Amino acid sequence: MRVDVVTIFPEYLAALDLSLIGKARTAGLIDLGVHALRDFTHDRHRTVDDTPAGGGAGMVMRPEPWGEALDHVLAAGRIALGDPAAVPALVVPSPSGVPFTQAFAHELAGRPWLAFACGRYEGIDERVLEDAEARLEVYPVSLGDYVLNGGEVAVLAIVEAVGRLLPGVVGNADSLVEESHEDGLLEYPVYTKPASWRGHEVPPVLLSGHHAEIDRWRREQRLLRTARRRPDLLERLDPTQVTSADLAVLAGAGWQVRSGRFRFVPAAVAD
Ligand code: ADE
């Protein structure tokens, strides 16, 4: 996969030299190009921002350096990929983007080429996105309902989430399947040795050697943890896709099927 990132802080992306993503790059699975936005300015101060049209607080990123930077990314990437018609999906991290999810990570992992535009200040002049939309698919994406200082941290998160889904990046592909968010439930709790630590025990079932019981216990933990920590996920789960044993576990935690959806029903109104 080819990945291009345009930023005013290229050093921020040095973290992509490390760990699994760094190894994937060394192995040739990810070809990363980091581009300094200021290289596409033409004034002495290498200016990338200006005051907002219409007034208001903060600064907005000017369109001209962005236009030139994205033209460069398109041309350089087409040469690197050896395909003069190739187009990247352009991801623009922003607190006003659509929420980034595991499903979207899978969608992006299927693309041969991703480009990222890191905004700073109050954001990028909207015409940059309009102009890019004429040539590329543009995805404004948010990591969550909070505000970061810029898109760089979001790019690190998105590249890591997408990169680990590429074949060969994570050594044991099984560990990708049994994960939080792969099937709408959170992951079960995990333990290792020693069996007893500071008075806390590994749940005995995990040491029993009974694989069917271990599987049942883990499934139960996933359901209960999701109900407790992420009731929004449980409300989105299709009740027809779970077993009667699952229904019993959830009923014990106060979750019942009402009008085809899981709903938390306080004991006093449960039938
Ligand atoms: N840039 C600033 N805040 C962000 C967020 N929450 N997600 C993605 N990019 C951002």
Image (spheres, grey):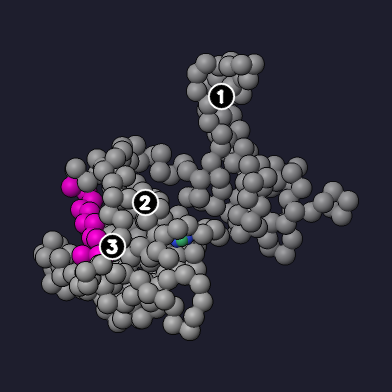
Q: If the image is split into quadrants, where does the N terminus sit?
A: bottom left
Amino acid on which disc 3 is placed: Val
Residue underneath mark 3: 6
Q: Which residue is mark 1?
A: 206
Dot 1 and dot 3 residues touching (CB under 8 Å) = no
Q: What amino acid is found at the position of numbered circle 2 in the picture?
A: Leu
Q: Residue at x 19, y 42 (%)?
A: 26
**Span of residues in magenta:** 28-40
Q: Is residue 241 rendered to the left or right of residue 160?
A: right
Which element type, helix, strand or loop, lies under badge 3?
A: strand
> Which percent across, then down, holds residue 222?
59, 41
Residue 144 visible (yes or no): yes
CA separation in Å, label 1 and label 2: 35 Å
Q: Which residue is mark 2?
A: 156
| Vertical comparison of 152 with 54: above or below | above
Q: What is the C-alpha distance between the residues marked 2 and 3?
A: 13 Å
Vertical placement of residue 133 versus 88, above or below: below
Is residue 32 shown in magenta? Answer: yes
Closer to the camera: disc 1 or disc 2?
2
Q: Quadrant of residue 80?
A: bottom left
Taking the view exactly as shown, the residue that stands out farthest to the front is 44
